[in-house]
Image: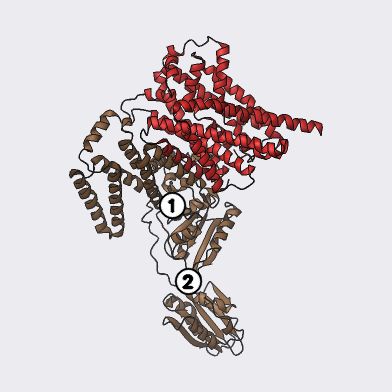
Chain colours: A brown, B red
Amino acid sequence: MRIRRSKHNKTTNSSTLENQIKLEFHNTSDLQFKKFKVASLDITLAFLKDISDPIIIQKTIISPLLTVSDGDNSIQIEGLPDLLPIASIQKVTDYNSITEHVMDGCTIIIVRDKQTQNVYVVDTIKFIKRTPDEPVNEPTISGPRDGFIECIQDNKTLLRMHLKSKDLIFEKFTLGTDVSTYIYLVYLRGKTKETLIQEVRDRVSSVEVDYVKDGAILAQLLERNKFSVFPELTSTQTPTKVANALLEGRVSLLTDGSPTALIAPTTLNMLLQTPDDYHFKWIPASLIRMLTYITAFISVLLPATYISLVSFQHGLIPTSLAVSLSKTREGVPFPSVIEAFLMELTIEILREAGVRLPKPIGSTVSIVGAIVIGETAVSSGIVSPMMVMVISFTAICSFAIPNYQLSLALRTIRFFILFSAATLGIYGMLIAIFIVSTHLVKLRSFSVPYLEPFAPINIKEWKDGFIRLYFKAGAKEDNVNE
Amino acid sequence: MNEKQPSLPIIIFLISTIIGVGIVTLPRQTALIVGQPNMWVSVIFGSIVAFLNACLIFMLIKRFPKQTLFDFAPKVVGKWIGKLFSLIFVMYAISISAFIIRTMSEIVNYYLLDRTPNSVVLAVLVLSCMYLVSSGLSNILMFFQLYFPIIISMFIILTILSIKSIEVTHLRPIFVNDGLELLKGTNTTFFSFVGYELIMVLSGYQTFTKWRCMTKIIGISLGSVCAIYVLFFILNIGILSIGELKVITFPTIEMAKTIEYQGFFFERFELLFLFGWIVTIFTTLTAYYYSALLGVCKIINCKRNICLNTLVGTAIFSLALVPSGITELFSSATYLNNLSYAALIGIPFILLVISFAKEKFQ
């Protein structure tokens, strides 16, 4: 929002400037003006009283100026900033930016003597913020426990604390035509490919929307594959993840007012890693990494495999198991496909209900739902116990996936593969896997293949793929761009 | 790996293309012709012939860097004959794809889906392949790289599991050589190495000019396929014996069926084999499908688009439905072999001679 050109001219005097500000803010009640005289100078302070800190204004602006004796004529208009005990005070020549500064919580100082008028901006923002607690959906066992918060200044501070490097660069963008939001592009100069930075810059500046609500929404605005279920940018709330990504030569985007930081480019491998993997010794860490991969596969394929084995290829199940399976399925009125869909649906509903309800009730609902419904469904013979086991194990596996967005994507894929398995058995499942992997192979996140390092094959990078090899002291850090 | 033109994707492409139907049907065909326990020697002969043929092809593409067969054929023999040659190659690619997917659908019908009509099995496969082919060569190469470790590990696991059931007596006598029979077998085994001719299509994507690089690519890919085939021949003969091989339609799958480990979740391992094998069929189909599509595009001078893609897909699909049963399918292999001779040896040889002659006379 800008002061309109027609109203603006160089010779505006102070009172009309005040009026203009008032007009711009439509006389909102929290816009405050404070007028006083220091020696021969007329001073007007303008600020929004709710987001500017009155104590800072009193201590750093008003009281130093009021102590100046009235008769002191040596004070010149240009000398005013020297009187104020503030680290950053800026002179504003472009009056169009005044509204923006006021909205940022700054105080505008309009100083006027008989001939001239100067405008200064002082940062007096008051933050309402929580402490940088550990993010709820990204808990860690032994890593740093700080998390991003809604205040972008603090998020930048957190990043600076994690990466003490002179190469750490923040580039500011302003998005939104109606409500402006600040976006910071963060990268490490020298580590990050210039083409990647340029691509991100281009994409960010090409976003044209009324306003950007949140980091997660920005991610969707930046994505190129609108029909893909897989996230093209990783969103995270932990500074550690962002710092690691920056060190690998990726870039990050911070959004004002959102605790979600975005990391680009993203690969599937990256979504299956957690910072914890690096905190333990490499052998257990590798086992955990492999477990994560297996978990991901199970969460996608298990129900489909079960369905196709039970309804198409019973011959492939060992005889004794087949006998006990058919015993448990005795009396179940539905074909196993319907049974699976029913159970999947129930689990998804339970999960959503658990998320929506307040925490204390939420856990009750899931316990009641899982135990009571599951137990009764089995004992009344609507579903077979094996099916309940398969579906709940799948659900548990999908909880074990480190990234929530990936787990959502895999949930969607699971239904597709389940459907294919229900129509064409193991063969249909295989074809569905081909289709999904074709999609993944086609997918690029900021020009980086999504399945790196598995396709294109890069065996050197496999040391941080299925497994996590030991660190070598003196070895160069990995970089996505190499 | 960090060379400007990595050869690994090409090697993987060729291996994934070459391994296909051969691994399932070849033991039987060879057993019918050679009929002795050391028939795996024919496989080695076959690979040598294939290697020589690949060298012939390479001499040709070396003369036209960054061009596919469809680009340089018109330059050498004139526009219309060149287009005819391209068309023969396209027909070859389409019919070989049709042949392999039909064989696959027979196997799928036999082992997995006994009541599903062939057309559904085929249509699903062709449609999913169409999706992959529409994404372009670089993505196809990536897809092959993604599945390559899976294919290889499937072969390794199957080998390890079946070593136990080999009966050495079936493999004897080893050194009774009937050279003539083995050479006759070469004619059959050679065809299970087709796939390397697609280097004439890949040459448009990457330049091949050095003999060293080329022998490395062809040598490694044919060599490893040959190793896998020989291994599976030995497993087949060792587990099933020559007499049985002659009567079983799909010996390798039957071989996988004989593996039994009590207490595993899967008691039967043919599923594991079928899984990996369908992947190889899919990769082979993709490679030929793409070549055919590229050929069609170059012949009628237009960009790759969804209409042509559908056209080629439909052609493969309907050709695959032509044989009425498995006997007719196998007898159609004879026509296919003749077409292969034309596409593999005939066209490159004629083009090479003419381009040499042109160079001499100018």
Q: How far is the residue under mark 1 from the one under mark 2? A: 29 Å
Tell if the residue under mark 1 belongs to the same chain as the one under mark 2: yes
Q: Position of residue A155 (x, y in %)?
A: 46, 61
* Foreground of the two, A29 or B200: B200
Quadrant of the image occupied by residue A54: bottom left
Mark 1 is on which residue type?
Val
From where the camera sits, is residue B124 visible? yes
The residue at 41%/82% (across/down) is A29
Residue B260 as seen in the image, left or right of residue A197: left
**Mark 1 residue element:** loop
Residue A81 as seen in the image, left or right of residue A157: right
From where the camera sits, is residue A67 visible? no
Q: Nearer the viewer, mark 1 or mark 2?
A: 1
The residue that label 1 is drawn on is: A229
Disc nearer the start of the sequence (1/2):
2
Query: On what subunit does the disc labeled 2 rest?
Result: A
The residue at 42%/37% (across/down) is B121
